[in-house]
Image: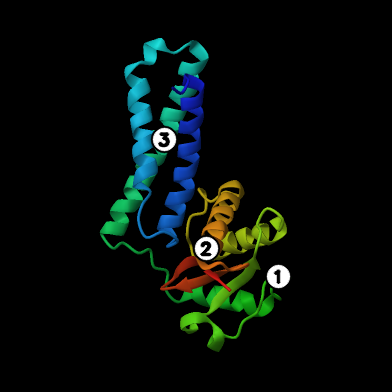
Amino acid sequence: MATVEEDLNQLEKDIRQLKIEYDMYFGGGRKRPPQETLWRAEQMIKRYSERGASLNFSQRFRFNNLSQSFAKNSEVWRKKLKQKEEGFVQRHFGAAAKAIEAQREKEPPPAAASHVPESRRPGGQPSLYEVACSDPDREPEKVQQLYKALVEAKKKAGEKTDALTLDNFQDFVRIKTQQLKKQAGSGQVEYSITLEDGQVKLKARTK
């Protein structure tokens, strides 16, 4: 039977995993929200809420912090799910797209980016930035450049970036790369940033 410390460690891990999986879902990298991980975290919080008196001071303090973090993030996820279900799309027409394209013409692409003609890109969708990655842990500079390019594109498109941290993004790229390589048996995953209907998208595909 797991100890209290082990349960709290698992809860902390699940909350961190939920942040990554929800980011993947809202970004189009997952087909469904992470219901299994969410259910496990909810059950753990319910269990220790009912037996809080049995926890010592440090355990109760840690549990309360984890519960508050889960509640705060759950509210954010709930609002985003509602927007997604209602078909809400934050659109920024014309000016944002033109500004990004103008900036691309002025600045040379980062060293890690691979320039691919539009005719060769899947669906002919123009890409703001592209990079191929085989092992994010050994290629941190590629992940950092991809993160910077994504944040810059979102800011220019008028999208919020407060919740997009480098640590969470690195975890996301690591997990996504491992998943796609395992599914396709490919050695590299190509990440691309595109602008669709005024909304910035991060896409991943095996090469």
Circle 1 packing at 10 Å, graded few (<14), some (14-19), many (20+), is some
Circle 3 packing at 10 Å, graded few (<14), some (14-19), many (20+), is many
Near-viewer residue (57 or 14): 14
In the image, which is nearer the foreground, mark 3 or mark 2? 2
Quadrant in which the C terminus is drawn: bottom right
Q: Secondary structure at mark 2?
A: helix
**Nearer-N-terminus badge (1/3):** 3
Q: Position of residue 54 (x, y in %)?
A: 40, 11
Task: Determine whether, in the image, residue 11 is placed left or right of residue 171.
Answer: left
- The residue where tag 1 is placed is 110
- The residue where tag 3 is placed is 70
Near-viewer residue (93 or 70): 70
Task: Determine whether, in the image, residue 49 is placed left or right of residue 171.
Answer: left
Mark 2 belongs to which amino acid?
Leu
Mark 1 belongs to which amino acid?
Pro
**Nearer-N-terminus badge (3/2):** 3
The residue furthest bottom is 119
Circle 2 packing at 10 Å, graded few (<14), some (14-19), many (20+), is some
At x 56%, y 73%, the residue is: 100
- The residue where tag 2 is placed is 180
Compared to 49, does 95 lie above or below?
Answer: below
**Nearer-N-terminus badge (1/2):** 1
